[in-house]
Image (tube, rainbow, N blue to C red):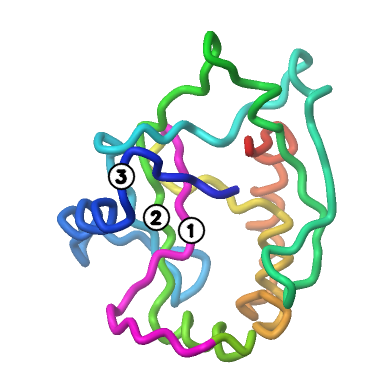
Amino acid sequence: SVVVISSNSMEEFTKMVNERYTEESLKEGYAHFCKHLFIQNDFTDVQVNVLPITSDNEHHLRTKYAARNEKELPVLIRWFPKELVASGENPLPKAKYLDLILYSREQINKENDAMDKEADPETAPWGIVSIKAQDVDFELPMAPITSMRNALGKDQGGSGIPLDRESYLEAYNYWKDHATVS
């Protein structure tokens, strides 16, 4: 699910992230080219985008097959439509933290090349590939379908990292009771 940083321009957001970035603050990700940078969300109005599934809200769950772009294989996704689970009088809580998922420049270039995308002129060693708004300063389990997609080759929208059964089951145990909001 996409996090929209509505109270900041991309330039302002990047500046705030770069001011908080240190090499020592990076946490290991699911592969050697993936890192996490957890920062306190004290400069955006971003709300959490994951909710527990309860008997009160499960009837709002939606599913569909979707691809993030025309070159990826569609996969089955599940979510709560935001308009059905949040309102002006019942807003989603503001996220306490942002989990910035970073890929190495080398990996970004490999995936762009495999998907026939133009070369990115950026030279920074790390690039943000995803932002997760959450209430904890540690990695939440990756959605099981994301693990499956990542196991695909780069030419299908994955990263080519084999599926790890233990990590997948950990993710299943979390996501069977949670869904994204979008």
Which residues fall within the magenta stretch? 118-135
Which amino acid does the dot numbered 2 rest on? Answer: Leu
Using a 10 Å C-alpha cutoff, classify the residue at mark 3 as few (fewer than 14 neighbours), some (14 to 19) or many (20 or more). some
Circle 3 sits on which residue?
Answer: 8
Q: Which tag is nearer the camera, tag 1 or tag 3?
A: 3
Disc 1: CA contacts within 10 A as few (<14), some (14-19) or many (>=20): some
- Where 76 sits versus 162, above or below? above
Q: Amino acid at mark 3?
A: Asn
Tell me if residue 49 comes above or below residue 166 in the rendering. Answer: above
* Residue 148, image x, y percentages: 73, 65
What is the x, y in percent for residue 8?
30, 44
Residue 84 position by quadrant: top right
Q: Quadrant of the C terminus?
A: top right
Q: Residue at x 41, y 35 (%)?
A: 46
Check residue 130 for magenta coloring. Answer: yes
Task: Tell me the kind of residue under disc 1.
Answer: Ser
The residue identified by callout 2 is: 100
- Image coordinates for residue 60, horizontal then vertical, percent: 79, 25
Label 1 residue SS: strand
Q: Tell me the tag on residue 101.
A: none
Choose between 85 and 165: the one closer to the eye: 85
Instruction: Looking at the image, tell me whether mark 1 or mark 2 is earlier in sequence order.
Output: 2
Q: Are marks 1 and 2 in contact (CB under 8 Å)?
A: yes
Q: CA distance from mark 3 to mark 2?
A: 16 Å
Left or right: where does residue 86 sit relative to residue 106? right
Task: Provide the residue designation for mark 1.
Answer: 130
Left or right, 82 with reference to 21: right
